[in-house]
Amino acid sequence: MKCEHCTRKKGEFHKLADAKIFLSDCLACDSCVTEEEGVQVSQQNAKDFFRVLNLNKKCDTSKHKVLAVSVCPQSLPYFAAKFSLSVTDASRRLCGFLKSLGVHYVFDAAVAADLSILEGQKEFVRRFLRHSEEEPALPMLTSACPGWVRYAERVLGQPLTPHLCTAKSPQQIMGSLVKDYFARRQNLPPDKIFHVIVAPCYDKKLEALREDFSPALHSYRGADCVLTSGEVVQMMEQSDLSGRDAAVDTLFGDLREEELRRHDGASSDGHLAHIFRHAAKELFNEDVGEVTYRTLRNKDFQEVTLERDGEVLLRFAAAYGFRNIQNVVLKLKRGKFPYHFVEVLACAGGCLNGRGQALAEDGCADRALLRQMEGIYTSIPVRAPEASASVQVLYQEWLGGADSPRAQEALHMAYQGPGRPASSRDIKW
């Protein structure tokens, strides 16, 4: 008898490894992940993805799902490097492959990062203006990295969680965009859409398990499954399907292909650079062009300052990796922390170095591949979130205005740590 690998039909795949969270993959310790969550994470894999694809091929249409895939911006350089393509061609190749499998829509998740950054910009200015020694509102710590946020909530708790930016992460916002805004445009209930996120790290799988649902989703998660870039590349390498390259879809349902853009961060969504420029202009009427980083303790701890007549007006920092995060936490707890804002990422080297991609066969980072990815990423033109026409449409059509109660509810959350986050309606500005 032939083994199943020898007898697989066209379009079938070898069994892919189940997703697991190892200590070396995690920012902190196993106190962040319950046994039940570990089981749920292990179920977020290619097997679950193909289960839905196969259901769509059955005759019972009541069980059919609309498959939508959102691709994180830091994943695209990995696909480009792996397949020796430009980032635009890699995006089209990935989109064509997914649609050849039966995916209906493929989205660029950069628009969700736009919204997250813009909300973070406004929040920082509010915090800066109300900050005092009696009621400290600073520093503001970013909330875009799920590994860091989970560590802050589950392990650190008070007095650190009040410093977390309340703007939802790009993944959380993308979930609401797909299952609320896009679903309503397509006249679909949220549970009719199976939403997959392609991301550079495993922590995104944990983030998908959060239970702080947006009211518009009616207790449905924004992301049903998260696949790492490495898992998708494995699927592509095993495939013998010959799909045509295809353009990425838009949330608005039109056929216009948008040019790829990135945010101003060397390996991240660029919260620091964009919030720094906005704060300099709003608070001190200073126009900042190129943001200059100064490396301090190591290459993953950098500082950015705005100075006038010898006085430091703004002091921002980027802290990547667990050792730098520990130093930030210790200094913050001791009250000896000079920064107004810190961009915190769990992965040393930033999001491009997520453990869901750019790994060599020995499990260590593939430095040569990572350098290639960094070059590809920095070659993508930068666009400020304010310049996105799509964002302005979403604020008006989806949220009823940038400062509306609906925007507050959909784009923000509050934290109660250790424990689960409170409703966004509980935030006190």
Image (tube, helix red, strand yellow):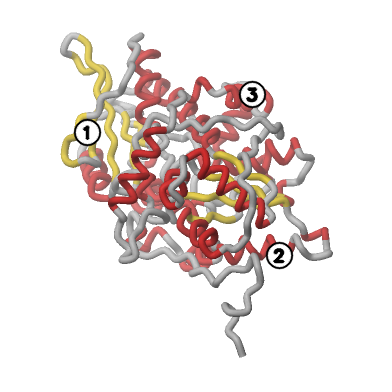
Query: Residue at the location (68% across, 61% down)?
Result: 52
Specify the amino acid type for callout 1.
Answer: Phe
Element under label 1?
A: loop
Along the line of sight, the residue nearer the viewer: 407 or 78: 78
Q: CA distance from mark 1 to mark 2?
A: 54 Å
Residue at 58% x, 68% y is 13
The reply, left or right, for residue 100 in relation to residue 317 is right
From mark 3 to mark 1, how far is it between C-alphas? Answer: 39 Å
Residue 388, located in which quarter of the rendered image? top right
Residue 178 spot, x, y in % from top left: 65, 41
Task: Indicate left or right for 45 with 406 as reference.
Answer: left
The residue lying toward the viewer, choosing from 345 and 132, is: 345
The residue singled out by tag 1 in the image is: 337
Residue 295 appears in which quarter of the rendering?
A: top left
Marks 2/3: CA–CA distance: 35 Å
The N terminus: image quadrant: bottom right
Q: Nearer the viewer, residue 43 or 351?
A: 351
| Residue 407 sits in quarter | top right
Residue topped by disc 3: 393
Question: Mark 3 belongs to which amino acid?
Answer: Val
Residue at image point 35% right, 32% down: 140
Q: Nearer the viewer, mark 1 or mark 2?
A: 2
Label 2 sits on a secondary structure element that is helix
Instruction: Determine crowd level at label 1: few under 14, some 14-19, many 20+ residues with C-alpha closer than 10 A.
Output: some
Q: Earlier in the sequence, mark 1 or mark 2?
A: 2
The 10 Å Cα crowd at callout 2, few under 14, some 14 to 19, many 20 or more, is few
